[in-house]
Amino acid sequence: MTFLGAGEKPLVEVKGLAKHFPVRQAGLLSRPRMLRAVDGVDFFIARGETLGLVGESGCGKSTTGRLLVRLYEPTAGQIRFDGVDVAGLAEREFLPYRRRMQMIFQDPYASLNPRMTVGDIVGEALDIHGLARGKGRLERVHELLGRVGLNPDHAMRYPHEFSGGQRQRIGIARALAVDPEFVVCDEPISALDVSIQAQVVNMLEDLREQFGLTYLFIAHDLSMVRHLADRVGVMYLGRIVEMAPKEELYAHPQHPYTQALLSAIPVIGGQGRGSRIVLEGDVPSPLDPPSGCLFRTRCRYAEARCAEENPALTEIAPRHWAACRRFGA
Ligand SMILES: Nc1ncnc2c1ncn2[C@@H]1O[C@H](COP(=O)(O)OP(=O)(O)OP(=O)(O)O)[C@@H](O)[C@H]1O
Ligand SMILES: [Mg+2]
């Protein structure tokens, strides 16, 4: 299943989602400035769908993922999960939802407590949610380790005894322990050796089928979401600049930023995608973003009027949205 059927409600839907971090500058007594990590994002994810989210470092992907599972409180916006706005719920009311949405973290080294055994890391959420005890808990932990390609005796060991790929498998087992419906996969393969990236992607794909999961799959670059995603959103400086079904996005990228990202992907054995579009300069600081269209400082189509208004996401073809004044937004 890829898209929302008629009358079907999305599993996840966000509207106007924003996270601004107060940042104090060293040595200055002035008021903290606001860093707009996520600044007005709208999207939905249908049940069983995988939405890919891509963009350069610092564009707000992890912050978006953390907001969805409520590791961060949003500055503004709604997060609807199965029809309920969970952004406004008190912790106690949110607990049943916490079980239903889990996260696999970007850094398999920092995300596992070094003082806990693998068995306790995977079993901890079972305790918190009161899902299994004693022998049942141990059996469940062993079963989960098996699902991610590890052995029961790994439960007695500590994270430092494992490779990056194995640690990421432990993180995946931990996320699956509570039988979630929705999993945010935050760059689960970026930190791993190229030789094992495909294994982990294939495993995530199998687990999606076995458990009927819905994913938000975050990656730096478009080649990494190509395999798993049904639709892809492209982020730039805290906003989504383009979103479309995967085939459509790869075949007809419309936003100049997406075009540049795609042109950077080498095509193995082919003629390439034509000329590579080189993005000038770095991403501007989200503390001091450009006026008007946020991408204009690196855009080859920029004109004077792009400095005046930040274009809204507009549906330019069925299910294909882009934010650029060239599409009349
Ligand atoms: N806790 C925080 N406090 C202050 N600023 C933060 C915090 N977390 C993230 N940021 C800032 O918010 C912006 C978005 O960060 P985020 O981690 O969401 O980006 P990302 O797209 O996941 O990047 P990467 O690809 O490097 O993981 C960055 O400028 C980052 O420095
Ligand atoms: Mg990140």
Image: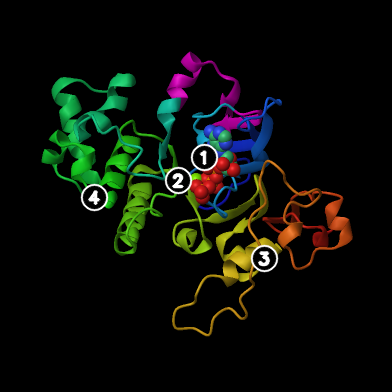
Q: Could you give the CA–CA distance between mark 1 and mark 2, rounded to whole angstroms? A: 7 Å
Q: Secondary structure at mark 4?
A: loop
Give the amino acid type for the residue marked by disc 4 in the picture.
Answer: Ser
Q: Could you give the CA–CA distance between mark 4 and mark 2, rounded to whole angstroms? A: 18 Å
Of circles 4 and 1, the one toward us is 4
Q: Earlier in the sequence, mark 3 or mark 4?
A: 4
Give the amino acid type for the residue marked by disc 1 in the picture.
Answer: Gly
Please name whichever residue, 188 or 306, is drawn nearer the observer in this view of the structure: 306
Q: Which mark is residue 135?
A: none
Q: Which image quadrant for residue 116?
A: top left
Q: Secondary structure at mark 2?
A: strand
Q: Which mark is residue 65?
A: 1
Q: Which residue is mark 2?
A: 186
Residue 90 spot, x, y in % from top left: 53, 15
Picture layout, residue 245 above or below residue 12: below
Q: Which residues are magenta?
A: 74-97
Q: Earlier in the sequence, mark 2 or mark 3?
A: 2
Q: Are marks 1 and 3 in contact (CB under 8 Å)?
A: no
Of circles 3 and 4, the one toward us is 3
Of circles 4 and 2, the one toward us is 4
Q: Which mark is residue 280?
A: 3
Q: Are marks 1 and 2 in contact (CB under 8 Å)?
A: yes
Of circles 1 and 3, the one toward us is 3
